[in-house]
Image (cartoon, helix red, strand yellow):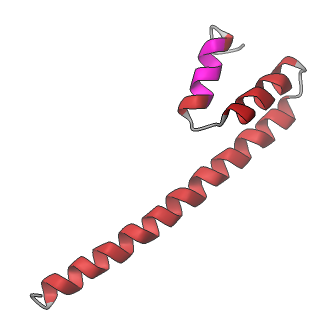
Amino acid sequence: MGAYQTKEALEQNLRDAGCEERCVREFMQDLEQDRMQAGLRLLNQHRRSLLDAMHREQKRIDCLDYLLYQIRKNNI
């Protein structure tokens, strides 16, 4: 398990990172079958998905900030 003391701790970390149960299962299978490259690919895909979601939300925040700025500027 490396830095993780238990299988359960590793699984919980994956869940805390937003991995769905399918992702947790696949990663754990890859780990148990010594297919670390496949497991890393899976985690990198999940990371990209999280970053894409974060960027979408940031764009929404930026739009809202601009609207607030315009409203304050024009005293609406």
Residue drawn at x 22%, y 80% is: 69
38 vs 22, left or right, is: right
Depth check, front residue: 27 or 76:
76
What quarter of the picture does the N terminus occupy? top right
Percent from the top left, x then y, of residue 59?
A: 45, 70
What quarter of the picture does the C terminus occupy? bottom left
The extreme front residue here reads 21
Depth check, front residue: 53 or 39:
53
21 vs 41, left or right, is: left
The extreme bottom residue here reads 74
Query: In which quadrant of the rendered view does residue 7 lie?
Result: top right
Residue drawn at x 77%, y 23% is: 28
Percent from the top left, x then y, of residue 48?
A: 66, 53
The extreme left residue here reads 75
Q: Please state the extent of the stretch shown in magenta in the rendering.
A: 8-14
Percent from the top left, x then y, of residue 33?
A: 90, 20
Query: In which quadrant of the rendered view does residue 15 lie?
Result: top right
Above or below, 20 relative to 69 = above
Q: Is residue 30 magenta?
A: no
Q: Is residue 12 magenta?
A: yes
65 vs 62, left or right, is: left
Identify the main secondary structure in magenta.
helix
Percent from the top left, x then y, of residue 19?
A: 63, 37
Query: In which quadrant of the rendered view does residue 21 lie?
Result: top right
Above or below, 59 relative to 15 = below
**Number of callouts:** 0
The extreme top residue here reads 5
Residue drawn at x 74%, y 34% is: 22
